[in-house]
Amino acid sequence: MLADDIAALLPRMRRFARALTFHREDADDLVQIAMERALGRSEQWEPGTRLDSWLFRIIKNAWIDEVRSRTRRAELFAPEEEGEHVGDDTAQAHQQRLALQKAISLLSEEHRLVVGLVLVDGLPYKEAADVLEIPVGTLTSRLARARDALQQLLADPTRRTP
C-alpha cells in the first residue's frame, strides 16, 4: 500500500526537510505538508518510479512555496538553535555540528538543496538531479561550488557569505 511505503520513508523525508530548513519545527511542518500533498495526489505517482524521488520533489516544491510565502509576508526565518555544552567530547562534536549547520545555512538555496540531497541524504547524483529537475552536470557543478563554499565558510567562520 502506498501509504505504508510513504510512512517507511518518513525518516529520510524529515532528514531532507531538516537540511533545507535548519529548524526542527519547520522541518516537521514541511514533512506534514508533503505527506498531505502526496496522499492527496497519490494518483500522480507513477508505479515503477522511485517513490523517494517523488516525495523529495514534493518537499522541495513545498519549501519553495514556503520561502516565497514568507518573503511576501516579510517574516523572518525562525532563529537557528544554538547551545553551549562545556566539558565533554560531545560538546565539541555538538559545536562542530552547529558550525556545519550554520555554514550550510549560509549557502544559497540551490546549493543547500544539492547538499541536502547528495551529502545529507546520500541520494545518487542521477536521483538528486531528477528530484531537482536539472541535468546531472548542473547538479555536479552546483555540488562542487557548494563544497568549495562550505570549506571557505568552515575555514573562516567570520565570513557571512561564501
Image (cartoon, helix red, strand yellow):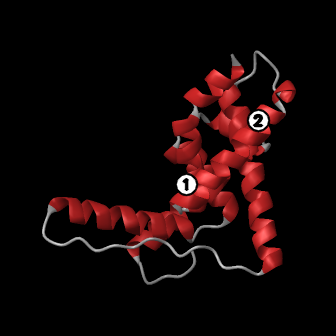
Residue 90 in the image, given as x and y percentages of width and height: 21, 59
Front one among 2 and 85: 2
Comparing 134 with 39, the one in front is 39
User: Which of the two labelled residues, at mark 1 and mark 2, occupies the earlier sequence position?
Assistant: 1
What amino acid is labelled 2 in the image? Answer: Ala
Cα distance in 3D space between marks 1 and 2: 20 Å
Taking the image as shown, residue 123 lies to the left or right of residue 101, namely right
Which residue does the image show at 53% across and 41% down from the upper left?
121
- Quadrant in which the N terminus appears: top right
Q: Position of residue 11 (x, y in %)?
A: 51, 38
Left or right of 36: which side holds 84? left
Residue type beneath disc 1: Ala
Q: Position of residue 104 (x, y in %)?
A: 52, 64
100 left or right of 107 in image = left
**Discs 1, 2 touching: Cβ within 8 Å:** no
Residue on which the image places disc 2: 38
Residue 63 image-quadrant placement: bottom right
Mark nearer the viewer, 1 or 2: 2
Q: Residue at x 51, y 58 (%)?
A: 24
User: On the image, which quarter does residue 93 sit in?
Assistant: bottom left
